[in-house]
């Protein structure tokens, strides 16, 4: 009889990280100062499209003597941190989870993807790091005189087929890097919230008929018409054989728990969360939200034009929102609106009536009159 293998931990779907971040590229082949200058220029070029990080090693000969961690905020909106810590790939994946791309100084650390800079003065350095060149995205020639080193031609016989730029081709290089960022943007799934208690309505709000069918099914079809793989979020124990469902794994946390449960189901997707009590939301609103999606921020949210705060239950939550949500939960907060208010969010404004919640029988009857003319 074959012995059943013991599984110690619950098997969860993992975030698709590279060595240190969800999307990283190491730069190697030249001096650290040239790499740092290159990163600065590329970051300046890409700052409107993406959030960029840079992982490097200290080049100081003296060890930091500070006996405390410091967090120095500047009034311009920047933070300088100095922390006593060891490099740890798991912790860096948390620290760098908010970045769309992390550049890595390849002279010190290995990245999943690479940019190779050809510099005649650094042939020995390249030869020493040949095994780190696993996924070269493109090559940059530091000057016109430089050519491929023999060690590169021997290790990579087809290296001349890889795209080559001159160092001065900054705009073209930035476009190439931006394409690498765009390739990693998460696909969007739909999540229709249907696990609420509907206390004020006195009956299940998801079963109410505004458009010739239960609102739950109308909401699913609305998202599917916009080409989203869509799931229904339900309370634990309410599984359906008909619908694609995600059961709440974070009990008694309402919409907050539903969003976290969706990310636990698949942390590599963005989730367009859509409440079942918004009968005036139509395909145009969904398309507007999708059109203005900003994946460099943690979410893209709808806000009524005269409202102070965004509506958290018609919002696209990016994968980078998941660790933020869990961080708020660890502090005892389970309000998605509080998370959005205090985070980097893209806001899309619409008329207030389009995102009006229907919570009571009286509101339901009034909504029916308006929808049916």
Image: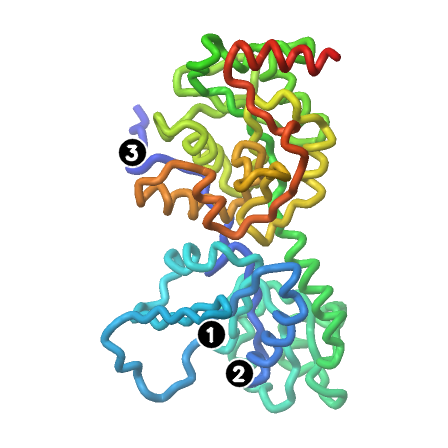
**Residue 109 image offset from top left, x and y in percent:** 47, 71
Are circles 1 and 2 on residues that touch, CB within 8 Å? yes
Secondary structure of the residue carrying numbered label 3: loop
Q: Could you tell me how far apart the alpha carbons at marks 1 and 2 are, in whole angstroms?
A: 9 Å
Are circles 3 and 2 on residues that touch, CB within 8 Å? no
| Residue underneath mark 3 | 6
Tell which circle, 3 or 2, labels the residue nearer the N-terminal end.
Answer: 3
**Residue at coordinates 75% horizontally, 71% vertically from top-left?**
171
**Residue 347 image offset from top left, x and y in percent:** 61, 45
Tell which circle, 3 or 1, labels the residue nearer the N-terminal end.
Answer: 3
On-image quarter of the C terminus: top right
**Residue 143 image offset from top left, x and y in percent:** 72, 87
Q: Could you tell me how far apart the alpha carbons at marks 3 and 2 are, in whole angstroms?
A: 48 Å
**Residue at coordinates 49% horizontally, 11% vertically from top-left?**
204
User: Which label sits on residue 32?
Assistant: 2
Q: Looking at the image, is 164 positioned above or below residue 324?
A: below
């Amino acid at each position: 009889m074959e012995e059943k293998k013991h599984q110690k931990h619950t098997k969860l779907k993992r975030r698709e990280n590279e060595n240190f971040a969800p999307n990283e590229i190491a730069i190697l082949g030249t001096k650290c100062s040239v790499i740092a200058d290159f990163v600065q220029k590329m970051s300046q070029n890409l700052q409107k499209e993406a959030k960029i990080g840079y992982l490097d090693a200290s080049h100081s000969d003296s060890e930091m003597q500070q006996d405390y961690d410091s967090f120095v905020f500047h009034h311009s909106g920047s933070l300088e941190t100095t922390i006593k810590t060891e490099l740890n790939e798991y912790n860096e994946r948390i620290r760098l989870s908010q970045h769309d791309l992390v550049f890595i100084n390849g002279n010190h650390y290995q990245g999943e993807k690479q940019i190779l800079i050809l510099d005649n003065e650094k042939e020995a350095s390249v030869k020493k790091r040949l095994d780190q060149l696993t996924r070269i995205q493109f090559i940059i020639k530091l000057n016109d005189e430089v050519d491929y080193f023999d060690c590169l031609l021997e290790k990579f016989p087809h290296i001349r087929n890889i795209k080559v730029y001159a160092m001065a081709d900054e705009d073209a290089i930035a476009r190439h890097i931006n394409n690498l960022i765009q390739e990693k943007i998460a696909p969007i799934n739909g999540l229709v919230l249907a696990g609420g208690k509907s206390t004020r309505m006195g009956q299940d709000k998801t079963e109410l008929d505004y458009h010739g069918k239960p609102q739950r099914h109308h909401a699913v079809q609305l998202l599917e018409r916009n080409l989203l793989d869509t799931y229904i979020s339900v309370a634990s124990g309410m599984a359906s054989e008909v619908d694609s469902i995600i059961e709440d794994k974070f009990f008694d946390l309402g919409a907050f728990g539903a969003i976290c449960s969706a990310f636990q189901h698949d942390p590599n997707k963005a989730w367009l969360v859509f409440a079942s009590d918004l009968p005036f939301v139509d395909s145009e609103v969904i398309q507007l939200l999708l059109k203005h999606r900003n994946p460099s921020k943690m979410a893209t949210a709808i806000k009524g034009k005269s409202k102070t705060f965004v509506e958290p239950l018609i919002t696209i939550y990016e994968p980078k929102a998941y660790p933020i949500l869990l961080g708020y939960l660890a502090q005892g907060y389970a309000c998605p609106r509080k998370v959005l208010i205090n985070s980097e969010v893209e806001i899309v404004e619409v008329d207030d009536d389009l995102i009006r919640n229907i919570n009571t029988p009286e509101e339901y009857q009034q909504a029916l009159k308006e929808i049916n003319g």
